[in-house]
Image (cartoon, helix red, strand yellow):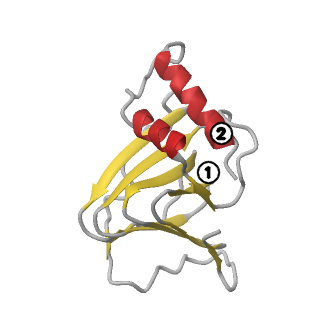
């Protein structure tokens, strides 16, 4: 696993990586967390390496880079997701994200009641071919996708795959 625990967890500010990266104050992007759907998605491409300000989300987040590498830093540690990995960030966890040059971020925010028993701590997960294609398709769905149609079935399969992630 690519988890690097902190030497000591504290309630203080999260230490940011000592790498030459600019803080992008436009992060995190605006998200409609109140959307009446199980998932809300965001796509964002970064030409330069950037660091987000410290933030949290009211929904759990599966953070995936189609290209590039992601790092998440939270009070309990650091997680690195190279290609074919994603980082699970539970709702309410304050964190900082670092995106390397030419990173293509795909984020899936999951409503708390959509998938029971998701991890309560950040973790790196494997993204196989099926999950990758489900994520890449889900981020192209309309925000108010038809829950009873093909888009809703696709989202249910995505959530089923997320539910069984190691």
Element at label 1:
loop
Name the residue rendered at 60%, 71% in the picture.
Answer: 2
Seen as rendered, the residue at the extreme front is 129
Q: In the rendered view, does 128 fall on the left or right side of 117?
A: left
Identify the residue position indicated by label 2 in the image: 112
Whichever of callouts 1 and 2 sits on the residue coming sooner in the sequence is: 1
Q: In the rendered view, does 35 fall on the left or right side of 112?
A: left
Identify the residue position indicated by label 1 in the image: 91
Instruction: Point out the image quarter for the N terminus.
Output: bottom right
122 up-or-down from 107: above or below = below
Location of residue 81 in the rendering, given as x and y in whole percent from the top left corner: 51, 64
112 up-or-down from 36: above or below = below
Location of residue 105 in the rendering, given as x and y in whole percent from the top left corner: 38, 54
Q: Residues within 10 Å of mark 1 (few under 14, many from 20)?
A: some
17 up-or-down from 88: above or below = below
Name the residue rendered at 36%, 51% in the picture.
Answer: 29
Mark 1 and 2 residues: CB-CB less than 8 Å, in contact? yes
Name the residue rendered at 55%, 21% in the picture.
Answer: 153
Q: In the rendered view, does 126 fall on the left or right side of 18?
A: right
104 up-or-down from 35: above or below = below
Q: Residues within 10 Å of mark 2 (few under 14, many from 20)?
A: some
Element at label 2:
loop
Seen as rendered, the residue at the extreme right is 117
Q: Which mark is residue 151?
A: none
Location of residue 122 in the rendering, given as x and y in whole percent from the top left corner: 64, 61
Residue 47 visible from this viewpoint: yes
Q: In the rendered view, does 90 fall on the left or right side of 84?
A: right
């Amino acid at each position: 696993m690519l988890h690097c625990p902190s030497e000591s967890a504290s309630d203080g500010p999260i230490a940011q990586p000592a790498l030459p990266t600019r803080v992008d104050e436009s992060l995190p992007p605006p998200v409609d967390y109140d959307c009446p759907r199980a998932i809300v998605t965001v796509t964002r491409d970064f030409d330069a390496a950037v660091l987000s300000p410290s933030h949290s989300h009211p929904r759990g987040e599966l953070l995936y880079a189609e290209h590039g590498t992601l790092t998440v830093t939270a009070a309990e540690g650091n997680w690195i997701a190279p290609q074919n990995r994603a980082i699970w960030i539970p709702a309410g966890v304050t964190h900082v994200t670092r995106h390397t040059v030419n990173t293509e971020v795909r984020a899936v925010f999951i409503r708390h009641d959509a998938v029971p028993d998701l991890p309560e701590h950040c973790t790196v997960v494997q993204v196989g071919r099926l999950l990758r294609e489900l994520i890449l398709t889900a981020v192209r769905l309309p925000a108010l996708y038809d829950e009873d149609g093909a888009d809703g079935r696709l989202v249910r399969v995505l959530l089923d795959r997320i539910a069984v992630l190691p």
